[in-house]
Amino acid sequence: MAEYDNNNIFAKILRGELPAHKVYEDEHTLAFLDIMPRAPGHTLIIPKKPARNLLDVDSESLAHVIKTAKKIAIAGKKAFNADGVTMQQFNEAAGGQVVFHLHVHIIPRHKDVPMKPPASAMEKPEVLAEHAKLLKAALAE
C-alpha cells in the first residue's frame, strides 16, 4: 500500500491551507461539507491524525471518526428533514477512493430522490454556507 501523502487536499484543510465549510470539530475529528455534494447536507468526516484509509488507520482514530459520523448523521437527518442517511467510505483507487485521507461521507436522503452522480457539480459557496449553518444549529440542539 502507498504511504500517506501529507499534501492531500484534506491534510491541507486540516492545516488551514485550504478553506472548508466546517460544521463540527473536536480534538480528534473534523467534519465539513463536500463541495460537490450528492445531496444537500453531504458532509465528510476525517480524522485529524494522518491515515490513508480504513486499511491503515489506528483503531482509536477510527472510533472517533465513527462517533462523529453518528453525530453528523443525526444532525443531518434533522437539519434537512431527511427520511434517511447514506454513509459511504471508500478504500484505495480500486475501491473508489479519490482523496487518500480516510473520510466518511454522511449524506441526508429523501425517499425517491436519487443522489447526484459523484463529483458532478460544485455547489455555490452561499448554498454551502447555509447548509453548514443548518447543520451547526441541529448539532447545537
Image (cartoon, grey):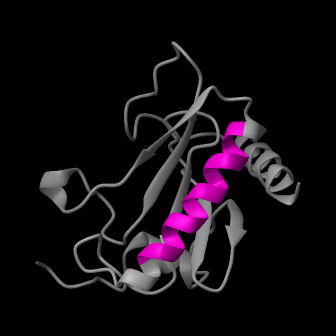
The answer to whether one can see residue 125 in this image is: no
Q: Is residue 129 left or right of residue 8?
A: right
Residue 36 counted in the magenta span: no
User: Which quadrant holds the N terminus?
Assistant: bottom left
Q: In front: 60, or 95? A: 60
Horizontal and vertical percent position of residue 138 = 82, 49
Q: Is residue 135 left or right of residue 67?
A: right
Q: Quadrant of residue 19?
A: bottom right
89 shown above or below 131: below
The answer to whether one can see residue 116 in this image is: yes
53 shown above or below 27: above
Q: Is residue 119 left or right of residue 42?
A: left
Q: Quadrant of residue 124?
A: top right
Horizontal and vertical percent position of residue 40 = 63, 35
Q: Residue at x 50, y 70 (%)?
A: 65
Q: Residue at x 44, y 58 (%)?
A: 104
58 shown above or below 38: below
Horizontal and vertical percent position of residue 73 = 61, 48
Q: In front: 108, or 74? A: 74
Q: Is residue 22 left or right of residue 4?
A: right
Q: How many marks?
A: 0
SS assignment for the magenta stretch, majority: helix
User: Which quadrant holds the C terminus?
Assistant: bottom right
Part of the protein shown in magenta:
62-77
Q: In front: 74, or 53? A: 74
Q: Residue at x 49, y 78 (%)?
A: 12
